[in-house]
Image (spheres, coloured by chain):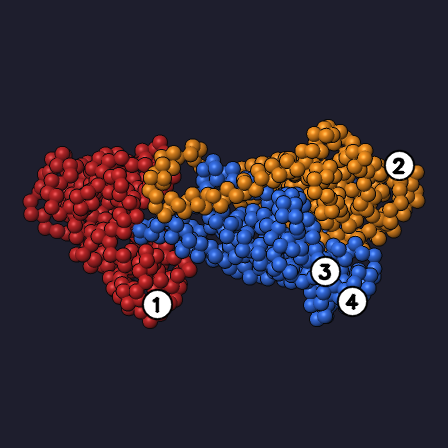
Chain colours: A red, B blue, C orange
Amino acid sequence: MSLTLVQAEKKQSLSRDEAIQPLKTLENSKVRTEDLNAWYGNNQVLKNLNVEAREHSVTAIIGPSGCGKSTFIRCLNRMHELVPRARTSGRVILDGSDIYSKGVDPVTIRRRVGMVFQKPNPFPTMSVYDNVAAGLKLNGERNHEVLDRAVERSLELAFLWDEVKGDLDKSGASLSGGQQQRLCIARALAVEPEVILMDEPCSALDPIATAKIEELIASIKENYTVVIVTHNMQQAARVSDFTAFLYLGQLIEYGETTSLFENPVEELTERYLTGKFG
Amino acid sequence: MSNYSLRRFKDRLALWLGALCAVLAMIPLISILYEVVKNGASTINVDFLTAAPGVIGQPGGGIGPAIQGTLILVGFTIIIGVPLGVLSGIYLSEFGDNPIGRVIRFLNDVLAEFPSVVIGVVIFTLIVLTLRSFSVVAGALALSIIMLPVVTRSTEESLKLVPNSIRDASMALGIRRWRTTLSVVLATAKSGIVTGILLAIARVAGESAPLVFTILGSQYFFSGLNSATDALPLRIYRLALLPYPYAQAQGWGAALVLILMVLVVNVGVRLATRGRLYSTRS
Amino acid sequence: MSGRLNLQKLFEGLKHPSSDGFFRYGSLVFAGSVVAIIVLSLVVLVQGAFPALTKFGVSFLTGTNWDAATGFGALPYILGTLLTALIAIMIGVPISLGIAIFLAEMAPDVIRVVVSNIVELLAAVPSIIYGLWGLYVLRIWVANYVQAPIQGSFGFLPIFGGTSYGLNFLTAGLLLAIMIIPTIASISREVMVSVPNSQREAAYGVGATRWEVVRMSVLSYSRSGIFGAAILGLGRAIGETMAVTLVIGGVTGASALPTSLFRPGQTMATILVNQLSEAESGSLQLAALLGIGLVLFAIAFAINVVAQLLVWRVLKVQGGAVE
């Protein structure tokens, strides 16, 4: 699919500084990072990242393989630290407070910031119903009505309800790839997070399944904040409102998607977008 | 003979020697099964399986207490050994990638190959001598120690087969580590773990050396946790020591019962896991 | 794999008295039970054997008497263990290797499945049943087809002396060989299977026959792993008890010295079975028996450590499953 054509009102020539500094209008900021650095052992993967994701919008993270996109979003829900010898420095501000400050329980962060992974990973021994309900059930929710409602609501949001409502007891693993990924999205939505992180959610799926998920993202963004990592530039252009371009662990450019794609400020960005590398 | 045909001859020879070795190894198994069935089948009847042993030297009686004893012992061993082994396996799989874990894993493998007679001796000294009596408890403890490393090892391996993406998915939902491990990872690895436990039970049910020093053996049915009992492998041993023909026949009968128990579990597990062994892989 | 213990993580876990830390350290306690068991065993045995060890000192290991009056020496039983184990290894290793090579490199699919299942079932048979079979079947066979003809022709040689109706070192060693074959064969086979195919292909590429490929590529690569498997088999042979007890005869004292293949004897494991449960509490005999238990513990531990190191190293290096 080609880039959607948007009428450019006027050529905006942002200065280099403005392109990479955190946008000062913070009223809409849902989660932003301040000088975020991340390491695996002695290998530094992220360098002084200052990126933000605005509330009720979709922010895309793009860049060539190995630029740290996955590591970046895993820092947003404190999953990065689960890897042995991984560490971070800097701040990640969610709704005004740093999720890395002392005394913060990472588990509570992960309930507010959900995640969908590259390869669909439904729990193999659980049914569709149990998969979606897992986040609630395993955190102590026992009330069947509450669970039923949550499951139905989440599956509807994930555009999967109609396809599975006839047999919620069938195994999660028996669904097709695209359905499994929507199941994982429903599972993530069921715990009612505020932010949804998506790590290349469509890269293992065919174009039809991909289109469905992109539709889904567009529909949930009015109630959630979505950060999506993608190596597919066209997808970023279709789906996101803001885009951050990372290269070798550093933020090269950040801005509204349409202006970044139409008029990238940095030469590096322009070269990446036109396929000269990556 | 040209060089090439000499080489070909050696190749053929190697094949036939290898096959010969395989045949040599199969002969004992076939002989054992044959002898056990041939000599033991005629002794088996309901009386034999349920009655207590008769007076020594006179034919009659059965292996009832022995069968009961084995079942009771195995039951207690499961209660002690399985939770211990599964939790150890959980530690090694989920948290064990560090020096302490490596030491534990290594020592676990060493204990797995340990002579069971030494374990029997230790329990004898520690418990039987201290309490001044042979007992079911001592026997169960000895068998649990033998079972422990086997269950630990197979639990760890089954858990490691669960892909990390499953753990990630659960953690990302804000589910705590312990809940993730128990409710998600363990559930996924369930069939592998159960298989390991079953095989460990079959192995432990056949052990006799540690029982000599811990439960001693007895003519009577179970009479309390703190007294001596009988068990199938032990009864076979005692029968083998008696010079009477009836004892010989009963020994084979008991052996048939034991080998059926053990082989049924082994073959059953083998057949059941044929297709499902890789079900945890997505 | 990380090398250093992550102290930061350790402290963090302690700081949050949360369920996760409890879980982690709780399961560690359970896992540590293995260590506790081994240490406890050592302590118990040393403490129990102490009277005998202090009274006899080194002569405990070199003496041959076995009674309260003249003292307790474990030499005959140590030698008995070594002899039976030696026989088991000498017969068992070549056959195991043959089976392993046959199964790993040569056998057609159907035969391989059948044979390997049978070999694994052999491992599942309880040792007391091996003993029973050894007592009633193997012994007779050895007495009639091995002992009689050999003694007929070479009976004058001391190594073939003695009458025993089949209850002797040779029968015991033979039985042990049969019992350890499944172990050695299956581990050797795993080691061979984990040799990367590129090695075999390289040899085939220069026109080698299948046997030559095995010899050049597979066996040389697998050498230390196979050695480790043999050592594990040795460990089994040394510790095996019930089966040996039924076929070895069970004598004590100087007459238990293994001077001939066809004489009855005693191993460290069998004398424990024969005497320990009746030994008087507090007696020197008990302490002597525990001393034998201690020696057995030490030998078994050392052998298993060496074997594990060899097998681990090889399987890890070749990228196969660790075990």
Q: Do discs 3 and 1 share a chain?
A: no
Q: Secondary structure at mark 4?
A: loop
Which amino acid is tagged 1? Leu
The residue tagged 1 is: A168
Q: Do discs 2 and 1 share a chain?
A: no
Distance from the alpha carbon under mark 3 to that under mark 2: 44 Å
Contact flag, marks 2 and 1 (Cβ < 8 Å): no
Dot 4 alpha-carbon crowd within 10 angstroms: few under 14, some 14 to 19, many 20 or more? some
| Relative image position of residue C119 (x, y in whole percent) | 67, 53
Distance from the alpha carbon under mark 4 to that under mark 3: 13 Å
Distance from the alpha carbon under mark 4 to that under mark 1: 61 Å
Look at discs 2 and 1 and give the one toward the viewer. 2
Q: Secondary structure at mark 3?
A: loop
The residue tagged 2 is: C158
Look at discs 3 and 1 and give the one toward the viewer. 3
Q: Is residue B96 left or right of residue A23?
A: right
Chain of the residue where label 2 is placed in the rendered structure: C
Image quarter of the C terminus of chain A: top left
Chain of the residue where label 1 is placed in the rendered structure: A
Q: Is residue B207 left or right of residue B31?
A: left
Of residue C220 and residue B171, the one placed in the foreground of this image is B171
Contact flag, marks 3 and 1 (Cβ < 8 Å): no
Contact flag, marks 4 and 2 (Cβ < 8 Å): no
Distance from the alpha carbon under mark 2 to that under mark 1: 80 Å
Q: Residue at x 64, y 35 (%)?
A: C46
| Relative image position of residue C19 (x, y in whole percent) | 36, 48
Which amino acid is tagged 2? Pro
Contact flag, marks 4 and 1 (Cβ < 8 Å): no
Q: Residue at x 70, y 45 (%)?
A: C240
